[in-house]
Amino acid sequence: MSAIHLDWLKSISADGVSVSMPELLHYRSKTGLLDLSPKYGLQARLSGQYVSAHKGRGMEFDEVRHYQPGDDIRMIDWRVTARTNTTHTKLFREERERPVFIVTDLSESMQFGSQLLFKSVQASHLASLMAWAVNRMGDRLGGIVFNEQQHAEQKPKARTPSVLHYLHHLEQMNTQVNNNTDNSSDDTNQHFIQTCMRLRRLARPGSLIIIISDFHNLNETATKHLTLLSQHCEIMAYRIFDPMEQALPKFSGRMTLPVEYNGEQGVVTLGDHKIAQSYQSEYQHMIAQQDAWLRRCRCIATNVSAGVPLEVQLR
């Protein structure tokens, strides 16, 4: 790790492996790096600060039309009525509130990092930045933090306490994951599927759902749940990756390293060109499959490296 990276970690009180509250609070002043404005028409039923496609009593003027029985007489446009000699009434676009759900994956595959941060730590940093951005915009924050063994669920609430509550979940579950030596699971995909099912129960139409994960556990079943969600909600996907996942490190000689994944033992040989090509090809195939599944959910993944500070990438 370079001296610059070490200085950066020290400046935010981080070690790159675990997560502490000071490093999550660091992102409170970085919300200008994000734009979480709605991409689609809002469908939430609560009043708020976003202009929806629904016409009614609001602050944003939409159009003038002929008066119809039942219209509020206070909305009559007397200038247009006098000019046309026909009663007209004003219509406004309603302002709607948007609940935001941040879903942070701290599964076993996220407990890896080769340069700067564990993927789980970078995911927590990004989730913190998102949470503070939601708070700045005045939206209600909810979400889920999960791994193979447990999940922390938070219903949407407004104001700063909801952000601090979510950050507490991030800190607590990162600590529990790092202290747990047995991360085995009977079904490595089931916890991701269950999280998608919980989202369908929690998220109301018009919600924004932000999923932060490496998506290693995304499969056909999970995609079906997310596709149903995308019919009424906007979904944003942020894929956390480590540079070593994309390509093996270049090595002048030849070295065999033991590896373990999902409880299975194996070896990786550095310095072998064919193995390096096959390794890179397998990763690209996995990413292509993830992208195909995510397109069904009307979203495109934004890639975030765990090897570079978050604020550098977003800048």
Image (tube, rainbow, N blue to C red):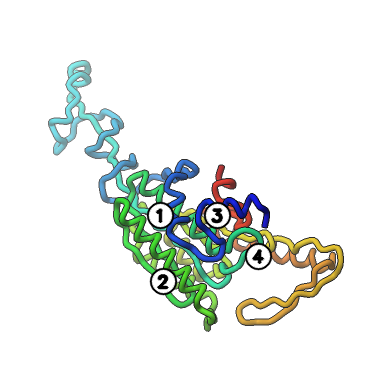
Give the foreground label among 3 and 2: 3
* Residue 191 to residue 86: above or below: below
Q: Which label belongs to residue 286?
A: 4
Q: Are marks 1 and 4 in contact (CB under 8 Å)?
A: no
Q: Earlier in the sequence, mark 1 or mark 4?
A: 1
Q: Earlier in the sequence, mark 4 or mark 2?
A: 2
CA gap, disc 4 and disc 3: 35 Å
CA gap, disc 4 and disc 2: 26 Å
Which residue carries the number 3 mark? Answer: 10
Which residue carries the number 1 mark? Answer: 233
Q: Which label belongs to residue 192?
A: none
Inspect the image, locate mark 1, and give the three-letter code of the amino acid beneath it. Answer: Cys
The x and y percentages for residue 145 are 43, 66
Q: Residue at x 83, y 66 (%)?
A: 271
Give the foreground label among 1 and 4: 4
Label 3: state its secondary structure.
helix
Label 2: state its secondary structure.
strand
Q: Are marks 4 and 3 in contact (CB under 8 Å)?
A: no
CA gap, disc 1 and disc 4: 26 Å
* Residue 184 to residue 233: above or below: below
Inspect the image, locate mark 2, and give the three-letter code of the amino acid beneath it. Answer: His
Which residue carries the number 2 mark? Answer: 151
Between 151 and 113, which is closer to the camera in this rendering?
113
Q: Earlier in the sequence, mark 3 or mark 2?
A: 3
The x and y percentages for residue 213 are 53, 62
Disc 2: CA contacts within 10 A as few (<14), some (14-19) or many (>=20): some
Inspect the image, locate mark 4, and give the three-letter code of the amino acid beneath it. Answer: Met
Quadrant holding the C terminus: top right
